[in-house]
Image (cartoon, coloured by chain):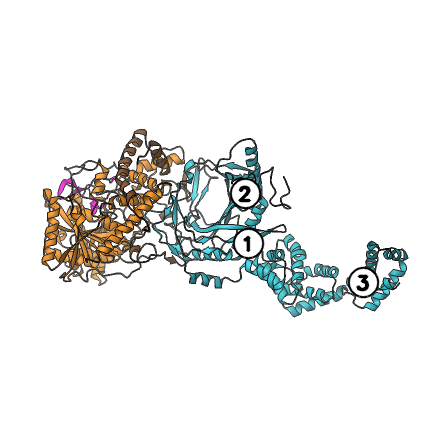
Chain colours: A orange, B cyan, C brown
């Protein structure tokens, strides 16, 4: 039998259900791997230094921010009792780790920020609760860019996440910890969030599979808000099949707690995984293959498209003319919403408060300036500016209008094709520190993931090859609203004829 | 300063006073506007502030249907337009009692647009136009007493639903402003959307006050915040007006500011203003899709509401022939209006009922701090009394005596009309109040009085009314008040003419 | 479009972010290059286009859901205040709030 961490989530679930493995065994296995590879398994100190320098001496990758072995093992024991007494739930005993954007009762939640160091939520995020309800065992919380703002996981207050394939490179962001942990086999799967590409891009950079569902399909309750009209939760795992299982548990209406949650019936995303893709029309946006795209990425993606054609799909050239505009539009809307969402971090009710202050105003200013990292502060400033009187119409409202136009462009495209395919990012993962002093260069690299975010469409990243420096390349699939099943189907069929997704970084085999 | 009550638009030292109001009414819902915590008053600090109210990371708002319903009811009551689609917006600013660092309110598109509130100021009917009414959440409270250099924040109140009601700057005196506030208070308590408890902060007014020379554009206004008593409202506005006028006469300009009224000193004082306090960066709240209110829903609420005070008053005027002033007074609250309608339903003449209610009964009830639903004299009893006036059994004078006698009588609390009539009749008999309608006895008295006052006769023949009235008085006295004044008048005139 | 140091200061005040003079200067430079990037949206013709808030509204009406007026949150003060910086007698303590 394969090592436990080599099993797919599906296989692991099966082994547990048939009691070939116990939940305790499985939990101990992953905890040991995390201990071996994680930077720190101790609860966070409240005074961690801000995001630092790449540290090749640490094979850590900095994925986990907090763990609690006793709690994990207690959960595993409880799962074993259920497995033994015929009360097992669908994913009983299968481990999962959560991006530190999701609040959890049993682990601290930091959102990668000093301003929340040590914060304990009195409730679990709905997504976390739903995964608990199908029997999953929590391994801990995973590192991410501060408040999900970043494309490299270089913006966390608790250390940079290194790419498991090459420690001198970024893992991607903002769900860098989640992607790295799955790639390293420290957890069979992880939850992530995607606002502008934060599931798809790190998944691509780390060679794993990830999906962002239609906006509103997964509850945002308990997901610390960055940009309310863009944030979505999604699974990150080793295959489309694994993602389908998790997505089924994660998605569904949360009418009681989230007013933006779509009130549509839950779906089983595994049902149509094996459907034949003969005749499937795959839209290829010409703007996604323009001059900014690196050759190695282009080659890998085109090879993937070729194999889809071999299975009977048909490529259709489509246009998404406002692709480039999605960058300024996103970077106006997201910071605007964020600037307001982050106002609650004021040192009054929870979180960090500065030590020395003479009056209320000083308390606010010092708390926030000391508690927030530079990228967060930049985006808050941008957001406050574009919402202010005199600029609101020219920036915020204008951006929302273009957003509608971008969304309508997609609808036009979907009249000609069933799914849209292209690269996830213009290049493979870049070197640590390469873009950290030039925030704008990070923004520009988001060009292919932003459009689907703005339109609220489901998007996937599927490993499809390797590029420069033997770094993974991801194929992006974008579907129309509520077409997650179709995306997973295409990805699953592709993974049936390729093995990119089964490969692991050398030191973590 | 002129006495404001007689000429409500009087200028003060040549300046016209311009006042607009913003009133925050706490809505009578069980749970908060965006969370399921209780809105009950008086709980221990932060025991009714749930995760959503505290703005804990990851929390989101979910809208309370009853709050929307209350807004619809208000819109109907003031004849405003209920927006089919309205938007919730974030008003961003930092304050410890504002947990999210923004207040969820409505900005560009509120739930109610327009409407008006009418009332009487003295004998003059006034109408104040409403700009809008919108839904928003209340903030928490800061407490200073127990702490040195610190304030304690209680977020129990955070998230309580508010309806903010904004007027045009239509008011021209402090008296008018207070009358408006009282009328608004009546409306919101009548229809049950607000408990009107001003001490508990259920009904809070901000007054925007400015002055100008007539014909000039509007002056710069200052806003007096959080007026929660009618008495203080008038004092505060009066002080502010005087202060502004003095400033202008001294050659200073008025700077826009928010001011607080100090009841102990009777003065308004500017709060520490931050120039950018007005930069709220409003934008539609992405956590809340647009609120849709269908016409069907509005109709359904309307049919459930019962007659609105303004409609009831209008009906009293058109169907019962009451003057507008009476109709307005009688519909000041449900208790009074119900009492009136019950009495009239039993056959008592509307204007008589109105006079007695607004006069004798109101005087006694006000002194005892009672409302008409707790009146020691029931509606059937009043009806019975008035019926006896109508059929000339009682003179007005006797009726007052009867009222006095019955007021404390337990029996007069009775509800059943037949029993009430019996009670009244027995008392009339017992007190000997029956009006003398037997003209032969009256003729006798008149002849006696004429005979006893020969000088008056001469004066009457010379055209002196006073002498005639004196004779009438003597006849009434001789009949111990029981003579019917009209009969006395007619008979006396007839007898004198025959001399 | 160019921001000024004064604007940086004003926005910083609005957002309650404190910056030293060099930090303000640095923020100014960064924000200016950011706004160079986003300037291009101004030239897009959006005449007649309605802003898009909830993305799903592209294809279907998204309206606000209304919940029944029921109290179901009980007193959980202790749990809710477990991460509070300063609490006394159940109240969150802050520097004195001056109101006049």
Compared with B189, A40 (above or below) is above
The Cα–Cα distance between marks 3 and 2, rounded to whole angstroms, is 55 Å
Q: For mark 1, does the 10 Å Cα neighbourhood hold few (<14), some (14 to 19), or many (20 or more) residues?
A: some
Task: Tell me if C56 is positioned left or right of B158 in this view.
Answer: left
For the residue labelled by badge 3, is the local secondary structure a helix, a strand or a loop? Answer: helix
User: Which chain letter matches label 3?
Assistant: B
Image: magenta residue range: A150-178
The Cα–Cα distance between marks 1 and 2, rounded to whole angstroms, is 23 Å
For the residue labelled by badge 2, is the local secondary structure a helix, a strand or a loop? Answer: strand
The residue where tag 2 is placed is B18
Q: For mark 3, does the 10 Å Cα neighbourhood hold few (<14), some (14 to 19), or many (20 or more) residues?
A: many
Q: Nearer the viewer, residue B92 or B430?
A: B92
Task: Tell me if A225 is positioned left or right of A28 in this view.
Answer: right
The Cα–Cα distance between marks 1 and 3, rounded to whole angstroms, is 46 Å
**Along the polypeptide, which appears first: circle 1 or circle 2?**
2
Compared with A463, A158 (above or below) is above
Asked if one can make out residue A225 in the rendered structure from this viewpoint, the answer is no
For the residue labelled by badge 1, is the local secondary structure a helix, a strand or a loop? Answer: helix
**Can marks 1 and 3 be said to lie on one chain?**
yes
**Along the polypeptide, which appears first: circle 1 or circle 3?**
1
Callouts 3 and 2 close, C-beta under 8 Å: no
Q: Nearer the viewer, residue B419 or A285?
A: A285
User: Which chain letter matches label 2?
Assistant: B
Q: Quadrant of residue B435?
A: bottom right
Quarter placement of the C terminus of chain B: bottom right
The label shown at residue B488 is 3
Compared with A20, A443 (above or below) is above
**Along the polypeptide, which appears first: circle 3 or circle 2?**
2
The residue where tag 1 is placed is B186
């Amino acid at each position: 039998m394969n090592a436990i961490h080599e099993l797919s989530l599906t296989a692991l679930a099966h082994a547990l259900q048939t009691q070939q493995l116990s939940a305790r065994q499985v939990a101990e296995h992953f905890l040991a791997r995390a201990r071996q590879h994680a930077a720190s398994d101790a609860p966070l100190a409240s005074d961690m230094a801000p995001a630092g320098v790449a540290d090749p001496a640490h094979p850590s990758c900095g994925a986990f921010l907090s763990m609690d072995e006793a709690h994990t093992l207690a959960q595993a024991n409880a799962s074993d009792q259920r497995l033994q007494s015929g009360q097992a739930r669908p994913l009983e005993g299968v481990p999962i780790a959560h991006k530190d954007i999701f609040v959890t009762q049993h682990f601290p939640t930091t959102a990668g920020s000093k301003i929340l160091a040590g914060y304990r939520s009195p409730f679990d995020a709905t997504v976390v609760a739903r995964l608990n309800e199908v029997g999953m065992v929590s391994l801990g919380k995973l590192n991410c860019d501060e408040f999900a703002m970043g494309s490299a996981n270089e913006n966390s207050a608790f250390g940079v996440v290194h790419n498991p394939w090459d420690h001198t490179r970024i893992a991607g962001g903002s769900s860098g910890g989640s992607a790295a942990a799955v790639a390293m086999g420290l957890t069979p799967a992880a939850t992530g969030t995607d606002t502008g590409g934060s599931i798809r891009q790190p998944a691509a950079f780390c060679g794993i599979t990830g999906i962002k569902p239609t906006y509103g399909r997964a509850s945002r309750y308990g997901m610390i808000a960055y940009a309310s009209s863009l944030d979505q939760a999604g699974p990150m795992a080793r295959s489309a099949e694994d993602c389908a299982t998790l997505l089924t548990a994660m998605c569904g209406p949360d009418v009681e707690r989230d007013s933006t949650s779509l009130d549509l019936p839950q779906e089983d995303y595994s049902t149509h995984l094996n459907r034949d893709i003969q005749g499937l029309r795959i839209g290829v946006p010409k703007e996604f293959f323009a001059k900014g795209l690196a050759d190695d990425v282009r080659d890998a993606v085109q090879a993937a498209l070729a194999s889809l054609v071999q299975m009977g799909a048909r490529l259709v050239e489509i246009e998404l003319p406002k692709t480039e505009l999605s960058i300024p539009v996103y970077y106006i809307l997201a910071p605007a919403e964020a600037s307001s969402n982050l106002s609650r971090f004021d040192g009054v009710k929870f979180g960090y408060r500065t030590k020395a202050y003479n009056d209320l105003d000083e308390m606010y200013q010092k708390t926030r300036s000391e508690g927030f990292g530079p990228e967060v502060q930049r985006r808050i400033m941008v957001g406050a500016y574009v919402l202010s009187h005199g600029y609101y119409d020219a920036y915020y409202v204008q951006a929302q209008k273009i957003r509608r136009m971008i969304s309508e462009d997609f609808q036009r495209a979907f009249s000609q094709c069933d799914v849209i395919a292209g690269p996830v990012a213009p290049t493979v993962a870049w070197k640590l520190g390469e873009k950290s002093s030039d925030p704008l260069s990070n923004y520009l690299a988001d060009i292919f993931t932003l459009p689907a975010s703005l339109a609220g469409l489901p998007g996937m990243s599927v490993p499809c090859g390797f590029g420069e420096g033997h770094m993974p390349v991801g194929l992006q699939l974008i579907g129309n609203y509520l077409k997650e099943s179709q995306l997973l189907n295409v990805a699953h069929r592709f993974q049936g004829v390729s093995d990119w997704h089964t490969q692991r970084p050398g030191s973590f085999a | 300063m002129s006495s404001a009550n007689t000429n409500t638009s009087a200028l003060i030292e040549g300046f016209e006073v311009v006042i607009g109001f913003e009133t925050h009414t706490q809505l009578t819902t069980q749970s908060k506007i965006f969370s399921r915590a209780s809105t009950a008053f008086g709980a221990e600090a932060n025991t009714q502030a749930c995760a959503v109210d505290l703005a804990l990371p990851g929390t989101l708002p979910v809208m309370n249907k009853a709050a929307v319903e209350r807004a619809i009811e208000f819109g109907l009551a003031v004849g405003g337009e209920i927006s089919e689609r309205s938007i919730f917006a974030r008003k961003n600013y930092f304050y410890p009692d504002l947990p999210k660092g923004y207040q969820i309110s409505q900005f560009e598109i509120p739930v109610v647009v327009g409407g008006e509130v009418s009332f009487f100021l003295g004998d003059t009917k006034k109408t104040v136009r409403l700009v809008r009414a919108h839904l928003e959440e209340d903030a928490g409270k800061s407490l200073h007493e127990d702490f040195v250099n610190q304030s304690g924040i209680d977020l129990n109140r955070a998230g309580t639903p508010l309806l903010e009601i904004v007027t045009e700057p239509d008011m021209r005196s402090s008296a008018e402003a207070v009358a408006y506030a009282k009328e608004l208070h009546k409306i919101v308590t009548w229809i049950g959307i607000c408990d009107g408890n001003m001490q508990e902060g259920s009904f809070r007014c901000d007054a925007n006050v400015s002055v100008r020379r007539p014909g000039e554009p509007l002056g710069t206004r200052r806003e007096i915040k959080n007026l929660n008593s009618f008495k203080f409202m008038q004092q505060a506005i009066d002080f502010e007006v005087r202060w502004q006028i003095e400033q202008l006469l001294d050659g200073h300009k008025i700077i826009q500011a928010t001011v607080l009224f100090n009841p102990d000193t009777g003065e308004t004082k500017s709060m520490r203003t931050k120039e950018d306090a007005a930069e709220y960066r409003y934008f539609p709240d992405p956590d809340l899709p647009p609120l849709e209110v269908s016409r069907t829903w509005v109709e359904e609420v309307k049919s459930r509401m019962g007659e609105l005070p303004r409609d009831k008053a209008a009906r009293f005027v058109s169907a019962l022939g009451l003057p507008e002033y009476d109709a307005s007074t009688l519909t000041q609250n449900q208790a009074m209006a119900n009492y009136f309608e019950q009495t009239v339903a039993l056959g008592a003449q509307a204007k008589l009922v109105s006079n007695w209610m607004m006069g004798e009964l109101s005087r006694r009830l006000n002194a005892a701090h009672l409302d008409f639903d707790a009146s020691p004299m029931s509606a059937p009893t009043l009806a019975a009394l008035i019926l006896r006036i109508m059929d000339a059994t009682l003179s007005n004078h006797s009726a007052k005596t009867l009222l006095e006698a019955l007021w404390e009588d337990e029996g007069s609390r009775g509800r059943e009309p037949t029993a009430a009539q019996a009670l009244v009749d027995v008392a009339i008999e017992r007190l000997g109040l029956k009006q003398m309608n037997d003209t032969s006895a009256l003729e006798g008295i008149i002849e006696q009085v004429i005979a006893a006052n020969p000088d008056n006769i001469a004066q009457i023949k010379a055209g002196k009314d006073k002498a005639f009235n004196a004779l009438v008085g003597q006849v009434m006295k001789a009949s111990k008040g029981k003579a019917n004044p009209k009969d006395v008048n007619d008979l006396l005139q007839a007898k004198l003419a025959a001399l | 479009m160019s921001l000024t140091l004064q604007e940086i200061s004003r926005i910083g005040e609005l957002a309650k972010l404190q910056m030293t003079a060099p930090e303000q200067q640095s923020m100014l430079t960064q924000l200016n290059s950011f706004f160079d990037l986003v300037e291009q949206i101004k030239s897009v013709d959006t005449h007649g286009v309605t802003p898009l808030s909830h993305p799903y509204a592209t294809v279907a009406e998204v309206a606000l859901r209304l919940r029944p007026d029921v109290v179901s949150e009980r007193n959980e003060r202790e749990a809710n205040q477990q991460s509070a910086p300063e609490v006394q007698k159940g109240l969150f303590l802050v520097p004195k709030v001056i109101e006049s």
